[in-house]
Amino acid sequence: EGVVQVTGFDNVPRMVGFAELVDYRDSGALVGVSVPAAQLFAPVDQMVHHAMVGMALLLAASIAAAWLIGRNLIWRPVQRLTEAATQLTAGDYSARVGLQNITSEIGRLAGVFDQMAQTAEQDRAQLQNVNATLEQKVQERTKRLRASEAEFRGVLESAADGIVIVDKQGTMVVVNTALERLFGYSRQELLGQPLEMLVPHDYRSAHVEQRH
């Protein structure tokens, strides 16, 4: 079981969680569910979006005040705030205004902006770390599964006796080479067929009744 990020047939990045089917553990059958990767980052993106809306309103008010008051000292902080907001909107979560020494309303607004940007950057970094950890676990799990499958296949194919594994419906899902030689059927002919295919015709009905 594990989680992996893949790109679907619709070119949409997705996080896929999967696990082994308990009843088909020996066959290596898996069941999975996928979620668009964008949904995992939705909380951060939504927070940034709401913050940007609020910042845009505050920024608009600040610019209007600058025009009315006409003080040149306001233009530089406003310009830096605008540039930082543009960078953050473009996905640069390291954007900061950096006006800690200014005690005006613009300075306090810039301080709030920097705190918001820092929080967004930390949240996004945490999500990226979680994603990296999940991918590593999936790779390790996949490696172990492949090793186990290879070991199982090795034992199966090296067996001198014919071996067949069926599901609950009595359908053959795994056969080995010895079984192919024993009954004269190829693996392709056996897989997906009922087990009674290997039972003499006169005994097939009785075998089905015993199996159920």
Image (cartoon, grey):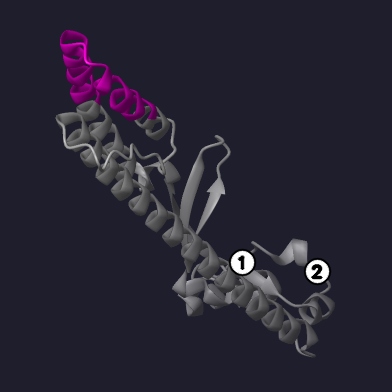
Q: Nearer the viewer, residue 160 or 67?
A: 67
Residue 73 magenta-drawn? yes
Which callout, 1 or 2, points at the residue further toward the start of the chain? 2
Using a 10 Å C-alpha cutoff, classify the residue at mark 1 as few (fewer than 14 neighbours), some (14 to 19) or many (20 or more): some
Of all residues, the one furthest to the bottom in this rendering is 160
- Amino acid type, callout 2: Tyr
Q: SS class of the residue under badge 2?
A: loop
In-image side of 201 versus 92 (left or right)? right
Residue named by callout 2: 185
In-image side of 146 versus 186 (left or right)? left
Residue 198 higher or lower than 44, as above or below = below
Residues shaded magenta: 56-83
Residue 183 higher or lower than 85, as above or below = below
Q: Nearer the viewer, residue 5 or 22?
A: 5
Residue 98 visible in the snapshot: yes
Quarter of the image containing the C terminus?
Answer: bottom left
Residue 121 higher or lower than 164, as above or below = above
Horizontal and vertical percent for residue 21?
Answer: 47, 69
Residue named by callout 1: 194
Q: Main secondary structure of the magenta part?
A: helix
Residue 205 visible in the snapshot: no
Horizontal and vertical percent for residue 116?
Answer: 26, 43
- Amino acid type, callout 1: Pro
Residue 50 magenta-drawn? no
Q: Nearer the viewer, residue 138 or 45?
A: 45
Residue 17 higher or lower than 117, as above or below = below
What residue sits 38% from the left and 58% below the top?
A: 126
Q: Nearer the viewer, residue 179 or 88?
A: 88
Of all residues, the one furthest to the front in this rendering is 72
Residue 140 appears in which quarter of the rendering? bottom right
Horizontal and vertical percent for residue 173?
Answer: 63, 68
Gap in Å between the C-alphas at discs 1 and 2?
A: 13 Å
